[in-house]
Amino acid sequence: MEGFIDALVPIVGMVSVFGMPVFIVWIALHFNNKKKEQFHASLQKLIASGQELSPELLQSIPGYVEEDKKSNDIKFAAILIGVGVGVVFLGYFGLHAKVVWASGLLVTSLGLALLAYGIYAEKKNSDDAA
C-alpha cells in the first residue's frame, strides 16, 4: 500500500501543476462567456420588444463591456524595460550567468522596441486628430 501512495504522489503533483493553469483559464473563459451570453440575451429581448438602443441603455445592460479604445503601449514598454534591466542585473551581479543577463537584454530590447512603437503610434494618432 505504501508503494502505491509513493507512486501516486508524483502523479497527483504533475496533474496538479499542469492541470491547474488549464483549470484557471477554463474558469476565466467560462465566466467571461457567461457574461457575454447574458448581455446578448438581454440585447435580443430589447430588440424583440422594439426599444431604441441608446448608448446609455446598452451600458446599463448586465454584462456590458466598454471597448478599450487606447492600448497603453508606453506603460507596458516601461514595465518590460524595467523587468529586462532587473534580469540583466540578476544575471550579471547575482548569478554570474551569461544566459540570464542575455535573456534580460532580450527583454529590454523588446521593451525598447515597444516603447518606440508606442511613441510612434501616439504621435500618429495626435497627427490624425489634428
Image (tube, rainbow, N blue to C red):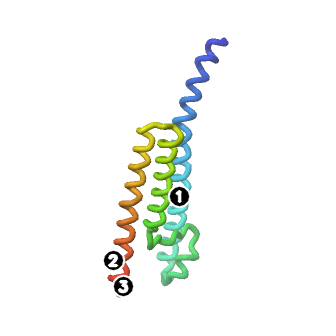
Residue under numbered circle 3: 129
Q: Of the two numbered discs 3 and 2 on the same chain, state the one appearing first in sequence.
A: 2
Measured along the vertical axis of the image, is residue 32 above or below residue 98?
A: below
The Cα atoms of the two marked residues, 2 and 1, are separated by: 33 Å
Residue under numbered circle 2: 124
Q: Of the two numbered discs 1 and 3 on the same chain, state the one appearing first in sequence.
A: 1
Q: Element at badge 2?
A: helix
Measured along the vertical axis of the image, is residue 20 above or below residue 122?
A: above
Question: Which numbered dot is residue 32?
Answer: 1
The Cα atoms of the two marked residues, 3 and 2, are separated by: 9 Å
Q: Quadrant of residue 4?
A: top right
Q: In the image, what residue type sits under mark 3?
A: Ala
The location of residue 34, given as percent across then percent down, is 54, 58
* Residue drawn at point x = 53 percent, y = 40 percent: 94
**Are there few (<14), some (14-19), or many (20+) residues within 10 Å of tag 1?**
few
In the image shown, does 63 or 68 lie closer to the viewer? 68
Quadrant into which the N terminus falls: top right
Q: In the image, what residue type sits under mark 2?
A: Lys
Q: Element at badge 3?
A: helix
The location of residue 114, given as percent across then percent down, is 38, 62
Q: In the image, what residue type sits under mark 1?
A: Asn
* Residue drawn at point x = 46 percent, y = 47 percent: 88
The location of residue 11, given as percent across then percent down, is 56, 25
